[in-house]
Image (spheres, rainbow, N blue to C red):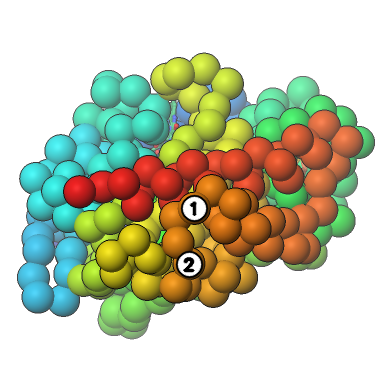
């Protein structure tokens, strides 16, 4: 492990002034929160900052409901949010996405801010034995293109990177139109979560719009008639402790037996959490009949660019959408 100095600022202003970054290029100074991803990256020689700035005790960890919706402090843990009664009852897709993530031990330690900023699980990114990884070292190529790309993305890819975004929570939040609140020495700004993540394009090492020194301070989820009838379906290689091969977060507003409006985001298939507006539009005013849902789900594959080993995802993601819509629609 590269030697580093751990800084524990006593106030947020000092932390923000450190200029620490979150996973952007070869930052000399980086933030650490729960440490569940960062420590692995340090141990695996993927990150090598000279300074780590701890956010412990500096950010809000409250989970609150107000007339506008939910406000989630970035320092709340995955476990706290998953078990919160309001979330379990009225925003079930969030709780389900979290309970299908990692392990109880990780969820007890990991924060919401860290979850949204965890790095990809592309095996070539995580193994420095492979030199070609544009995300780890810009300009070196991409070992996944012609390599084992079963886990990789079919949406939002570029000729430089096809890595999937790993967070389950982010998929559920994107389906619910959540926003992240960012703090820096210059003040605060709010960004829709879907715009927070960058497509890889020609710079896959830049994953978000976070600027140097900036932190995620909170997440807000708007109150919405779709939030209650929502569901997270995760398809993975083993039943627990595993990232998504494909996942679908679905939130519905129903009128009798018909879907009034649908919100759908996919995980495991995009270089960022992937909304499918074409499917949402097709399902507005549709019934829950299986064939209707299949026809709607088929629209999700527009723009898909599968590789040699992940072609199966094109079919699987449609099936995941259908099953998740059915599960959400059955909630009473
Ligand atoms: C074995 C294992 C299995 C897992 N399985 C899953 C899974 O199935 N699904 C899933 O979604 N996740 C999974 N994870 C990932 C896990 O959810 C993340 O490791 C965790 O959420 C990261 O949170 P943290 O607080 O520990 O972040 P850290 O490791 O401390 O930090 C992660 C990154 O975020 C930055 N950062 C943290 N907080 C902030 C902030 N507030 N503002 C700015 N930057 C910040 C850090 O600089 C760092 O770059 C798994 C992890 C492990 C170890
Ligand atoms: S897919 Fe992205 S993260 Fe994986 S090897 Fe290629 S450049 Fe690196």
Write down the quadrant of residue 175 in the picture: bottom left
Query: Which mark identifies residue 286?
Result: 2
Query: Which mark identifies residue 49?
Result: none
- Residue visible at 63% across and 47% down in the picture: 318
- Residue visible at 57% across and 58% down in the picture: 292
Q: Is residue 92 above or below residue 177?
A: above
Say whether marks 1 and 2 touch (CB < 8 Å): yes
Q: Position of residue 328 (x, y in %)?
A: 35, 49
**Cα gap from disc 1 to disc 2, whole angstroms:** 8 Å
User: 35 or 280: which is nearer to us?
Assistant: 280
Q: Secondary structure at mark 2?
A: loop
User: 106 or 66: which is nearer to us?
Assistant: 66
- Residue visible at 86% across and 56% down in the picture: 159
Q: Is residue 299 visible?
A: yes
Query: Which residue is disc 1 drawn over?
Result: 289
- Residue visible at 9% across and 60% down in the picture: 64
- Disc 2 packing (10 Å; few <14; some 14–19; many ≥20): some
- Image quarter of the N terminus: top right
């Amino acid at each position: 492990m590269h030697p580093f100095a751990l800084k524990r600022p006593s106030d947020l202003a000092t932390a923000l002034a450190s200029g620490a970054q979150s996973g952007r290029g070869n930052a000399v100074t980086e933030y650490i929160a729960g440490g569940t991803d960062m420590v692995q990256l340090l141990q695996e020689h993927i990150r090598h900052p000279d300074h780590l700035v701890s956010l412990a005790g500096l950010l809000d960890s409250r989970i609150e409901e107000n007339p506008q919706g939910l406000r989630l402090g970035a320092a709340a843990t995955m476990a706290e949010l998953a078990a919160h009664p309001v979330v379990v009852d009225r925003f079930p897709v969030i709780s389900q996405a979290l309970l299908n993530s990692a392990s109880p031990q990780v969820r007890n330690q990991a924060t919401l801010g860290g979850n949204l900023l965890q790095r990809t699980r592309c095996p070539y990114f995580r193994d420095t034995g492979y030199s070609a990884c544009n995300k780890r070292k810009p300009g070196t190529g991409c070992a996944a293109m012609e390599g084992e790309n079963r886990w990789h993305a079919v949406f939002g890819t570029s000729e430089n990177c096809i890595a999937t975004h790993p967070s389950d929570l982010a998929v559920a939040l994107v389906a619910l139109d959540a926003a992240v609140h960012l703090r820096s020495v210059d003040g605060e700004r709010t960004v829709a979560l879907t715009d927070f993540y960058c497509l890889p394009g020609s710079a896959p090492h830049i994953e978000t719009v976070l600027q140097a020194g900036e932190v995620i301070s909170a997440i807000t989820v708007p109150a919405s008639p779709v939030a209650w009838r929502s569901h997270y379906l995760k398809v993975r290689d083993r039943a627990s402790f595993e990232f998504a091969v494909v996942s679908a977060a679905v939130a519905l507003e129903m009128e009798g037996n018909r879907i009034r409006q649908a919100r759908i985001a996919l995980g495991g298939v995009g270089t960022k959490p992937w909304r499918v507006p074409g499917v949402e539009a097709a399902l507005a005013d549709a019934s829950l009949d299986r064939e209707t849902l299949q026809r709607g789900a088929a629209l999700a594959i527009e723009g898909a660019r599968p590789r040699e080993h992940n072609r199966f995802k094109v079919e699987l993601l449609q099936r995941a959408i259908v099953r998740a819509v059915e599960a959400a629609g059955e909630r009473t």
